[in-house]
């Protein structure tokens, strides 16, 4: 199947090919107003030696996870030139000849490096619908993979993955404390030393009828925390209190959202957030996404110390099994997370 990029370049597209016309994408989004301002977390405060500052940022994390499942991280210390380098190299990757990229094309999710375009799914009436995006995805931890071209790719991704893993560990320490758990509870219970980390690049070319297409339909992420940066072009929307919010990035911020394993571990206190990617008719959007999860073999269950007064709300499940079931679940089927709910 040609990539969406090729489709856009090869024809003077005036209207959306019917395969890409999505089911009711009509529920419009809102831009968050002052009464619903998006949570911002200052990462540097997590290293503060001032106990009041630390207590405040932990309380901010609790509120962000409990009320939104989403926040913008500022002062995270990841250099801007590393981030710019990553966007450049990803652009170069998507600019490579179709045959080069096709070397990585596979539908096997266990394949360590995978390129796909217009991923297929099913809508409620069982029609195939394609997403308006090309993507590249590979595992970077516990084992590191990366396409061998462009040549700078692997150094940049290696550095970014190490740095985001450090930030992820520190955030999860704060989140542990915000749940009333020991600071290192989550990293131990989720075996973060061998934690799963994926690098994904989503490439959304300009779309002739953006309101009828979808970049990625509504979903929750399977892991603990997902990190997302974008090339200055918006498109991420998150669900909050039943409404869709289009999120505008603060300069040099990273979007962080909570995933299903954090919902299970927190026994439902921190729900994984529903989100989607919309497309536009002007500019190519690239989002670089790092989902961080437990180690592949971890059996994830609600944290024991949280079950003193409340019964477990989720059945335990092996993380990789969870990922595989989620990947093969159709849009019109009950999500795997719901199937694990005990009441
Ligand atoms: O590109 C985006 O804004 C959303 C990407 C996303 O949700 C994902 O890759 O899981
Ligand atoms: Fe996602």
Image (spheres, rainbow, N blue to C red):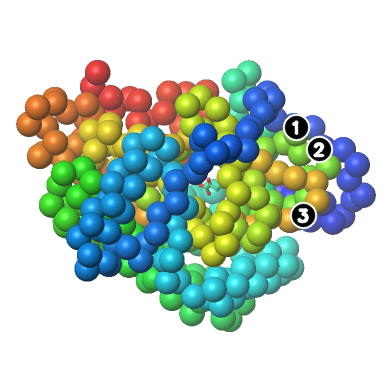
Residue closest to the eye, 140 or 174: 174
Q: Residue placed at 54% from the left, 48% from the top? A: 107
Residue closest to the eye, 125 or 32: 32
Residue 251 drawn at (x, y percent): 57, 62
Whether residue 46 appears in this view of the structure is: yes
Q: Residue placed at 13% from the left, 26% from the top? A: 310
| Labelled pair 2, 1 in contact (Cβ < 8 Å) | yes
Q: Which residue is mark 1?
A: 212
Per the image, label 2 sits on a secondary structure element best described as loop
| Picture quadrant of residue 33 | top right
Q: Nearer the viewer, mark 1 or mark 3?
A: 3
Residue closest to the eye, 312 or 174: 174
Residue 10 drawn at (x, y percent): 87, 55
Q: Residues within 10 Å of mark 2 (few under 14, many from 20)?
A: some
Instruction: Confirm or reject: label 2 Cβ below 8 Å from ligand 1.
Output: no
Q: Farthest residue in the left direction?
A: 308
Q: Which residue is mark 3?
A: 283
Per the image, label 1 sits on a secondary structure element best described as helix
* 55 horizontally vs 279: left or right: left
Residue closest to the eye, 48 or 315: 48
Whether residue 261 appears in this view of the structure is: no
| Picture quadrant of residue 180 | top left
Q: Which residue is mark 2?
A: 209
Residue 160 drawn at (x, y percent): 45, 71
| Picture quadrant of residue 309 | top left
């Amino acid at each position: 199947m040609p990539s969406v990029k090729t489709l856009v370049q090869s024809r003077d597209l005036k209207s959306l090919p019917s395969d890409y016309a999505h089911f009711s994408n009509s529920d419009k989004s809102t831009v968050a107003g002052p009464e619903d301002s998006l949570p911002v977390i200052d990462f540097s405060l997590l290293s503060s030696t001032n106990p009041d500052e630390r207590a405040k940022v932990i309380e901010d994390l609790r509120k962000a996870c409990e009320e939104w499942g989403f926040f913008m991280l500022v002062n995270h210390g990841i250099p801007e030139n590393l981030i710019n380098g990553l966007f450049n190299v990803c652009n170069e990757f998507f600019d490579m000849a179709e045959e080069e990229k096709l070397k990585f094309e596979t539908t096997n999710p266990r394949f360590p490096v995978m390129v796909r375009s217009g991923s297929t799914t099913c809508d409620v009436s069982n029609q195939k619908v394609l997403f308006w995006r090309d993507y590249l995805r590979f595992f970077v931890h516990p084992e590191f993979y990366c396409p061998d071209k462009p040549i700078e790719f692997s150094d940049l991704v290696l550095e970014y993955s190490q740095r985001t893993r450090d930030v992820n560990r520190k955030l999860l320490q704060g989140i542990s404390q915000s749940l009333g758990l020991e600071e290192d509870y989550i990293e131990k219970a989720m075996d973060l030393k061998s934690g799963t980390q994926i690098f994904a690049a989503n490439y959304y070319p300009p779309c002739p009828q953006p309101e009828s297409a979808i970049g990625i339909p509504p979903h929750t992420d399977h892991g603990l925390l997902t990190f997302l940066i974008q090339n200055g072009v918006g498109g991420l929307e998150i669900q909050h209190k039943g409404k869709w919010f289009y999120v505008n990035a603060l300069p040099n911020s990273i979007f962080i959202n909570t995933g299903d394993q954090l919902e299970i571990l927190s026994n439902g206190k921190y729900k994984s957030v529903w989100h989607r990617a919309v497309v536009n008719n002007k500019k190519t959007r690239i989002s670089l996404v790092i989902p961080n999860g437990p180690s592949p073999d971890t059996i994830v269950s609600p944290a024991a110390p949280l079950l003193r007064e409340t019964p477990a709300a989720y059945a335990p499940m092996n993380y990789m099994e969870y990922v595989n079931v989620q990947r093969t679940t159709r849009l019109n089927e009950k999500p795997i997370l719901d199937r694990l709910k005990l009441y």
